[in-house]
Image (spheres, grey):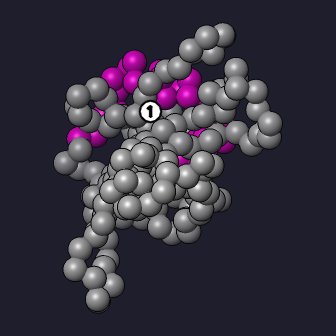
Amino acid sequence: LRGRWMITTMRLVQFCPKGSEGGIRIGVEQEQGHGVIDLKAFDSSMPSTMREFLELGKAGMDCAQRALASGQCVVSHTDIKLLSPVTRPDKVVCVGMNYRDHCLEQNAPIPTEPIIFNKFPSAITGPFDEISLPDNSQEVDWEVELAFVIGKKGKHIKASIVLHSLIKYTLNYR
């Protein structure tokens, strides 16, 4: 990345302790799956949801960095349930048919412009949540998607600073 912006890689997660499905927490996953640092346990001023965390901007990210560096307040993956990356997003905007091989696989023409569509926010699930199939379905058609979480409102953002508005990305399997 050129310019003055530095990209820091952290895996931020929403989780709840197993057995208390209503208590959402925010965490930072340690490298190589060694556990999740509970940000609220590390700093009681931290919010409980990812949405509230993202609204903190740099202050929230700085706290997450400090928590990760400290190695304190670690909970084991066996004691938590990972939730969707963001609960109740305002909108989910998607770009379809953006992968050449997928177009060919579907016998669909390769579009000359992006195909934009939306999903209902209730379609967002956690990584291990069950997917209910309609009665007349036998299987789920899956795809792997790259999702971006935009942390700041903006319009006509210059390409040179667009990554400053990008808070998080995640891979989605559906």
The answer to whether residue 167 is above or below residue 173 is: above
Q: Which residue is mark 1?
A: 42
Q: Is residue 1 left or right of residue 158?
A: left
Residue 148: x and y in percent read 53, 42
The N terminus lies in which quarter of the figure? top right
Q: What residue is drawn where x is 74% and y is 42%?
A: 153
The C terminus lies in which quarter of the figure? bottom left
The answer to whether residue 32 is above or below residue 120 is: above
Residue 25 appears anywhere in the view: no
Q: What residue is drawn where x is 49% and y is 21%?
A: 8
Residue 74: x and y in percent read 30, 34
Observer-nearest residue: 132 or 118?
Answer: 118
Q: Considering the numbered disc 1 on the image, is that residue within a helix, a strand or a loop?
A: helix
The answer to whether residue 2 is above or below residue 118 is: above
Is-magenta flag for residue 62?
Answer: yes
Q: Residue furthest top?
A: 3
Q: Amino acid at mark 1?
A: Phe
Q: Quadrant of residue 22?
A: bottom left
Q: Quadrant of residue 83?
A: bottom left
Observer-nearest residue: 70 or 147?
Answer: 147
Q: Quadrant of residue 41?
A: top left
Q: What residue is drawn where x is 61% and y is 57%?
A: 116
Is-magenta flag for residue 80?
Answer: no
Q: Residue furthest right?
A: 156
Residue 165: x and y in percent read 66, 33
Which residues make up the magenta segment? 47-76
Mark 1 Cα within 10 Å, few/some/many (few <14, many 20+)?
many
Residue 55 appears anywhere in the view: yes
